[in-house]
Image: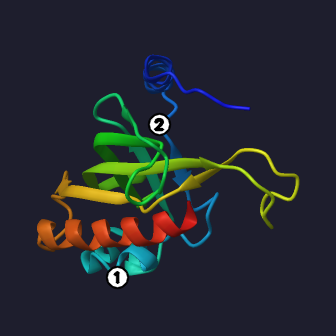
């Protein structure tokens, strides 16, 4: 049995996902308790100054793509070198908000180009005991990091951008 992927249909599907707001996500410390200014202050220590009494406060993160996703089809022989699908999200923005004086205040925006390689594999594994198709993600690539809307921070924006680039590449890549 074989499966075929049509590039035009995938482009159509991901463009509709983009238009519907599928890539616009929001997470707060209500959803993820570890999401506080204490965690982010490792990268940007001045974020503590935005909270009452300079104590750890809840945060929120929202995402918004800057342009529709681009898909490239490959051979699918190896997820690292020749993935079946390569998803590129250019100008992908992540807004970081801090709970301050009874409301969320945007502390800064992290913008970068994100590339996600994806393969489909078959066979019975521990994660897939019944067999069938299983998506496999390769290493998340974060490029061209930039920080904007950072007037409330005192750190060098390029240093914060590079630190977040490494954090997102490593931590988010492992979570996916």
Which residue position holds label 1? 42
Q: What residue is shown at x 52% (from left), y 69% (from top)?
A: 174
Cβ atoms at labels 2 and 1 below 8 Å apart: no
| SS under mark 2 | loop
Residue 127, label in figure: none
Left or right of 2? Residue 82 is left
Foreground residue, 26 or 83? 83
Q: Position of residue 28 (x, y in %)?
A: 55, 56
Q: Earlier in the sequence, mark 2 or mark 1?
A: 2
Q: Is residue 40 above or below residue 60?
A: below
Q: Residues within 10 Å of mark 2 (few under 14, many from 20)?
A: some
Q: Which residue appears at 53% of the width and 55% of the height?
A: 137
- Depth check, front residue: 56 or 109: 109
Q: Find residue 46 and report its horizontal and vertical position in percent.
A: 25, 76
For the C terminus, the image quarter is bottom right
Q: Which residue is mark 2?
A: 23
Coordinates of residue 91 in the picture (x, y in percent):
25, 41
């Amino acid at each position: 049995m074989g499966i075929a992927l049509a590039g035009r249909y995938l482009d159509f599907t991901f463009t509709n996902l983009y238009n519907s707001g599928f890539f616009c996500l929001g997470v707060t410390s209500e959803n993820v308790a570890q999401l506080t200014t204490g965690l982010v202050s490792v990268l940007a220590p001045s974020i503590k100054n935005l909270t009452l009494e300079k104590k750890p406060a809840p945060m929120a993160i929202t995402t918004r793509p800057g342009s529709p996703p681009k898909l490239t089809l490959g051979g699918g022989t190896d997820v690292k070198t020749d993935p079946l699908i390569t998803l590129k999200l250019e100008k992908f923005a992540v807004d970081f908000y801090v709970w301050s004086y009874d409301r969320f205040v945007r502390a800064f925006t992290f913008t970068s180009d994100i590339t996600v390689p994806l393969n489909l594999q078959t066979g019975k594994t521990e994660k897939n005991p019944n067999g069938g198709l299983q998506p496999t993600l390769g290493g998340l690539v974060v490029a061209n990091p930039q920080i904007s809307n950072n007037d409330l921070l005192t750190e060098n924006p390029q240093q914060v951008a590079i630190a977040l680039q490494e954090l997102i590449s490593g931590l988010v890549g492992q979570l996916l």
